Amino acid sequence: MVFFVALICHFIRSAFSEKTKKVCFKKDFFKNHKSMKSLQERIIFPVALGSLSVILIVLIWFAFFGGSGVSEDSSGSLNAAEFELQHTQSDEWTLNQAIVDTSRRIFDENGNWLSFDELLRYASTGEVNLVSELWALRRECPEDLTYEQCNEVIRAFIADHYSGKEVEYLMNLFSSYLKYEITMREFEFSDKLSNAEKYELIKKKRREFFSDNDAQLIFGLEEAEETYRNSLGGFLIDTESLNGEQRVQRYEEFRKNVYGQYYNTVKKRESKYNTYESEMFLKEDELERMSLSDRNNKTKHMREKYFGKDDADRIDTSNKAEERKKRKNKLYKRSLIYFCIGKS
């Protein structure tokens, strides 16, 4: 889904979009650490749509674009014949001017479009999510256009904005994507398969329609996130014996190895707070062995490193207020229990 979206919809948005996944680990992996949930939400949360993402996308596709057929509008809307885009024997695309005009009216009003080279470059690093861009592009089609008509408008846009081999490449990708989309819409998984096994099937299915390079271009970041999700538990176990600084360093090396060409994009999108929470989790064992005073000083230093002194002080004040609230609630519940026991 991904590729044709961005290729066709090559918007330059002031900032490129993002997405996520959740990981569950056995309690013995973490020795009952309080921060297990923190790691899941902070380190793993940016990866949250793994195996299920494809299934959800298929359902969304069915809900919004499941209709077929072409309708005529007496007010002058384009009919089925007007939406035919022909590929001639001379490898040129014959454009119906009505389709071209529609594609320009729908898509050009939003501003700047990426060149072919820019589109491929940004997609290859994960800065452009081609699947998300396709859905954004389809949402620009008027409501009275059917799924097939909207696809023809997208084809017209490609043929109108690119030339030569660029058009041929993008048209072939888009056609392959549509076949993949329909196949995944009808594909059924065995209930006996785990999520990891289902995702492996999805990856194999993709490569029935795309070369490995094209599949990487379209689905590469998503598949890297799935690898990250599945291998994070092993990394945490393997690095249990390291001190905090060593563990943080190994964590970045682990992410570079897993994400590869997408690492810089993942790093750039990561918020300071998530980075801080990840470091806190990785250093948790070390911090727990410190005295209360040393632990507070170390934590304060880490906060100042990420947020500056003023924001670190605000976080500290907020945390202390939260702790007071928790203690107050705990005392209230305890006194309520004693009261109930006394009444009985």
Image: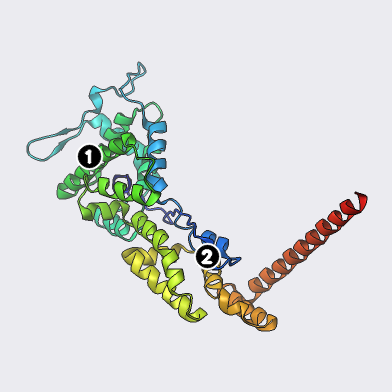
Residue 140 seen in the current view: no
What residue sits 22% from the left and 39% below the top? 175
Q: Amino acid at mark 2?
A: Asp
Q: Is residue 210 above or below residue 228?
A: above
Question: At which x and y percent is residue 263?
Answer: 37, 66
- Dot 1 or dot 2: first in sequence order is 2
Q: Amino acid at mark 1?
A: Ser
Q: Residue furthest front?
A: 344
Q: Is residue 298 above or below residue 133?
A: below
Count of numbered labels shown in the rendering: 2
Q: Is residue 46 above or below residue 81?
A: below
Name the residue tied to disc 2. 28
Residue 175 numbered mark, or none: 1
What residue sits 16% from the left and 45% below the top? 168
Single out the mark in the foreground, 1 or 2. 2
SS type, badge 1: helix
SS type, badge 2: helix
Looking at the rendering, which quadrant does residue 108 occupy? top left
Residue 196 vs residue 31: left or right? left
Cα distance in 3D space between marks 1 and 2: 48 Å
Residue 200 vs residue 331: left or right? left
